[in-house]
Amino acid sequence: MTDLPPVEIVATDLEPLKDFEGRIVVLVSGEGRLDAATRRVNRLCKGMVGRFVESDGFSDLKSGQSADLACPSGMAAAAIQVVRLDKTATVIEVRRAGAAIGKARGKADVLVLGGTRSRLSELVLGILLRGYTFDACKTGEGKAPAPGRTVVMVSDPVALTRKMVAVQALAEGVFFTRNLVNLPSNLLTTENFADRLVALREIGLEVEVLDEPELAELGMRMLLGVGQGSDSPTKVVVMRWAGGGAEAPLALIGKGVVFDTGGISIKAAGGMEDMTMDMGGAGVVAGVMKTLALRKAAANVVGLVGLVENMPDGRAQRPGDIVTSMKGDTVEIINTDAEGRLVLGDVMWYAQERFKPIGMVDLATLTGAIIVALGHENAGVFSNDDGFCDGFLKAAAAEGEGAWRMPLAPAYAKALKSDKADVKNVGNRWGGAIAAAEFLHRFVKDGTPWIHLDIAGVAQPNSAPDLAPKGASGWGVLALDRMIRDRFEGLKG
C-alpha cells in the first residue's frame, strides 16, 4: 500500500545549494523577480535561471506551471525546476504548482526553495497528492522507485511545521481512499475492508462492525438481499469521531460494493473489471474519518459504510423479488444491477434511527447516468436543503473538486411506482440519476438535511486529474473535510 512520504521543513540555508544532488525547485512570480535563494541558484548555474525567466518559455507558462532546466552547469543538481507562481495565485493554482513538482520528481530528492512565500502548506499538499503511486500488486521492475526526500526550505520553519499537521492529515485521508479504491476485489473483500477500518481504532476512532445476524435483526433486507449471492459476508461498519460538544453528529454514509457483477442482471463483460471501484463512496467516507481523527477535528461525525458483494449464484436475488427495507417499505427488484440504492437506503435509515444526525451526506458510485450528464469533471449533487447543499458546493469549489447540483422533484419519483410493492428500484431510462436520488429520498426522515453525492464519474476518472495519477482520485475527502471545518467544528450543542 502507498504510504505518505516524509516531508522535511528546514530553515533557509544557501550554503548547501551548490552540492545538492537532486532536483531544486525555485518559485518565480509572473513579474520575473528572483528572491534571495533563487538569485543564489542563478549565480551558481551561471545565469541559467535568469535567462529562462526572461525568455518566451517562461512568459508562456501559466501560474502553477513549470519547466525543467536540466544539468545546470556549476551545480550538483540533476535539474532546476522553475515554477511560475504569481503573487495573486489561488489555492488551486498553488496546489497545481505542487502537483507539477510531485509529478516530475521521480525517485530524486527534491529541495523546494520556499523563502517567505505564503500558502506553502498548500504547495506541499499538491506535491504529496500528485506524488501518489499505486503499485501494491506489482513486483520487480514494475514497482515504482521509492520517492526521495522532500525538503522545503523556508524562512519560518516553525510556522510551516505547525500547518503541516492538517496538510498531512488530509493527504493521509486521500491516500487511504485511493488505496482502498485501487485495490482489486479479491484483496479488498468485505471482511478485509472491515478489518482495515477496525484498524483505525489506533488513531482514536471508535469502530463497530455489524454482521449479518445483527443486520437481519435490524430488518436491513434491502442491504442483505444484494449480498445473498456472494460468499463474502455483508457487513456495516460504524466509525465515530466525537471531537465536538454535545451536538448531534454529522452522518456520512458510503456505498461499499466491493465488486458489482450486476447480479442476475449481469453487466456486459467489457469494462466489468472497473467494478472494483464500486466501493468508492465507502472509500471516501473512510478517508474523511481518518483525516478527522488525525487532525483531531473539533466536530462530531459518524461514518457508516455498507460492505457487500453483488454476485449471481444460485442464492442471488432475482428480478421480481420483493424485499422489505428497515424503514418498512416494500421494494420490487426490477434490476439487480441497481443495487447501490438498496445498500444506502437501509444504512441511511439506520443512521437516522440510531444517531439522529444534524445532517446526512451519502456518497456512491451510483449511476452511469450521472456520467452521461456530467462526464468525469463533476459529481452529481442532490439535496433537500438549500443551505446545507450550498455549504457543500462552496467547500467543493474552494477545494477544486468539481460538483454540480441536480434537481429533485416528485415527477421523477413517479417513475419508481410499482404495481406490486411500495416502490421499485428502477424506473425508465430517462433521468436515471435523478430517479436513483429520489429512491434514496424515500429514506430521508422529515427534518433531516440531506445531500446525495453520485460520484460515479469522479471516483476513478478516465484520465489523470490535476492532483492525482490515473486511477482512484480520492475525490470528496478534501471537500467534505472543508465543509466540516467550515460548518460543523466548534458547535456547542
Image (cartoon, rainbow, N blue to C red):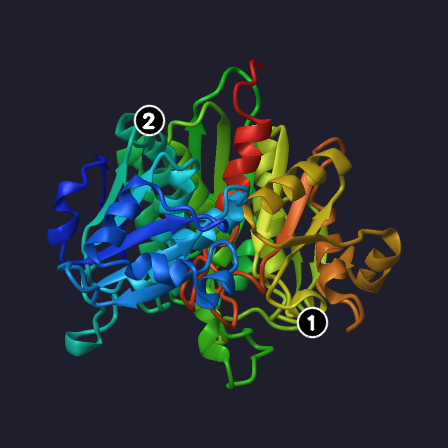
Q: Quadrant of the N terminus?
A: bottom left
Q: Which mark is residue 244?
A: none
Question: Mark 2 sits on what residue?
Answer: 159
Q: Name which residue lies at 79% across and 66% down.
A: 431
Image vertical order of residue 106 relative to residue 128, above or below: below
In terms of depth relative to the viewer, which is nearer, 330 or 84? 84
Q: Please identify the quarter of the rendering in which residue 291 is found.
A: top left
Question: Which residue, as the protein is rendered here, is positioned at the far left?
Answer: 19
- Local SS, label 1: helix
Q: Please identify the quarter of the rendering in which residue 21 is found.
A: bottom left
Image vertical order of residue 271 relative to residue 384, above or below: below
Q: Name which residue lies at 63% across and 59% down.
A: 378
Image vertical order of residue 466 relative to residue 93, above or below: below
Q: Nearer the viewer, mark 2 or mark 1?
A: 2
Q: Name which residue lies at 52% across and 67% down.
A: 461
Question: Mark 1 sits on what residue?
Answer: 372
Say what amino acid the circle numbered 2 marks: Ala
- Categorize mark 1 by other alpha carbons within 10 Å: few (<14), some (14-19), many (20+): few
**Residue 439 placed where, x, y %?**
73, 54
**Residue 257 placed where, x, y %?**
48, 61
